Amino acid sequence: MSKKIKELKVSAIENGTVIDHIPANAVFQVIKILKLDKFENMILFGTNLESKKYGSKGIVKVSNKFFKPEEVNRIALVAPHASMIEIKDFRVARKTIVEIPNEITGIVKCFNPNCITNHEQIIQKFTVVDKEDLRLKCHYCEKITVKNNMTFL
Amino acid sequence: MKNKSLISINDYSKEEQLKILQVAGEFEKTPVQNILKGHVIASLFFEPSTRTRLSFESAINRLGGKIVGFSEATNTSVQKGESLRDTILTVANYSDLIIMRNPMEGSARFASEISPVPIINAGDGSNQHPTQTLLDLYSIRKTQNKLDNLNVAFVGDLKYGRTVHSLVIALCNYNTTFHLVSPVELKLPSSVKMYVKEKNLEYHQYVELEEVIPEVDVLYMTRIQKERFSDPLEYERIKNFYVLKHDMIEQTKENLKVLHPLPRVNEIEIGVDKSSKAYYFEQALNGVYVRQALISLILGLK
Ligand SMILES: [Zn+2]
């Protein structure tokens, strides 16, 4: 019974994608990274929802949109435990857990103020050298950006 | 190697690096060869570095090539606010190869991605300076007659010194035993040590210099830079920590050679210069041969 009530907090969608288990404070970042702020179909989102696993969580539901794995993996930096659920006819068709990709392009800013990417129009590019601690090596200046000094574009 | 930019030392395989050293050896025997006739090389120094620039220019002149470019960014379109992208695309029209030094890290990699002609990185901020690494390798091989299985000590600023980082990484191909001598504040960063560990190579860390010297074949000294310290007293204390004196290299291996990327401040006493173990001035000269080799290989002339 309680499960049903919880689900009603963010209405169900007929076809589309549900991104669940987003940290409560990362919902807006997820929307931005997936460029949903420019998306025209219906989007439902909720945050500070109760979660057994994480205390509180956020959820985003996008109508009539299915993501490629590499698209959805872009959110792994802000929502490392998120799951992506594809809904068809109100039913779960597929469920996948996001994965931190080996390379990250155009999401994170290099922390090094003297890096060329912070002075010219260049798409930022990193290789992930440590997936546990989130350490990103800049393709250009070769310096490491760590979780604490990560800013998202 | 034809048309292949050199930005970081790892852009070239061990075989390619050895090829450059071999061709550099040929230039040492016959330094003047007119093979660059009809070629134009651009030399873009967005910040001054007289030593590196003269070494490249000398290499190009000995090969009979022509140079266009600038030795500092003042009075150029750069000062008027032109982007690096536009400068590179323009200069590429006038030249077969671009040598670039730029104070911004990553600038050389970026240039190599947009430029239709190959780029040689002559230093991008605190990041890479691969021709220095090649001349260091050349100097080590020349003085030791081999590169494999050597004991090499690095002394001084191991944290910020890009010369040290690149050479350590390059030497990981040769089963080197590393002896790392530095104050605790200036230890080799883990991002570089990672390469040593990956290859399972032996390394030792020290704070004292004296006990290390008798163990090693190569003693690579570096300058501790004042601008690394927020506290000037701390700099004064550490600066005098590692000063190589003549008597310190007396009871050492016959084949020991002291290297230094220059310029030095006070870390090697003048008295060491006359020792047959001091090699830092010849080391600088080797830079010309290595740069001759690199330029000719990239242009497909060797
Ligand atoms: Zn960077």
Image (spheres, coloured by chain):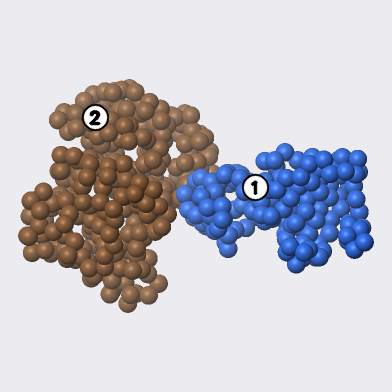
The foreground one among A78 and A138 is: A78
Q: Which mark is residue A99?
A: 1
Q: Are marks 1 and 2 on the same chain?
A: no
Q: Tell me what residue is drawn at x 15 percent, y 43 percent.
A: B144
Q: Secondary structure at mark 1?
A: loop
Q: Which chain is brown?
A: B
According to the colouring, which chain is blue?
A
Binning the other alpha carbons within 10 Å of mark 2 as few (below 14), some (14 to 19) or many (20 upward) gives some
Name the residue nearer the viewer: B150 or A83. A83
Q: Quadrant of residue B187?
A: bottom left
**Between tags 1 and 2, which lies in front?**
1
Q: At which x and y percent is residue A118?
A: 56, 52
Quick one: B151 or B285, which is closer to the camera? B151
User: Quadrant where the N terminus of chain B lies?
Assistant: top left
- Residue A98, horizontal then vertical, whole percent: 68, 48
The residue lying at 36 percent from left, 35 percent from top is B13
Relative horizontal placement of residue A90, taking residue A96 as reference (left or right): right
The residue located at (16%, 51%) in the rendering is B217
Q: Chain of mark 2?
A: B
Q: Amino acid at mark 1?
A: Glu
Q: Secondary structure at mark 2?
A: helix
Q: Is residue B127 left or right of residue A140?
A: left
Which residue is the extreme one toward the bottom? B233
Tag on residue B97? none
Instruction: Identify the chain of the residue marked 1, using the numbered disc in the image.
Output: A
Q: Amino acid at mark 2?
A: Val
Asked if disc 1 is less than 8 Å from ligand 1, the answer is no
Badge 1: few (under 14), some or many (20 or more) residues near its Cα, within 10 Å?
Answer: many
**B256 vs A69: above or below:** below
Tag shown at residue B23: 2
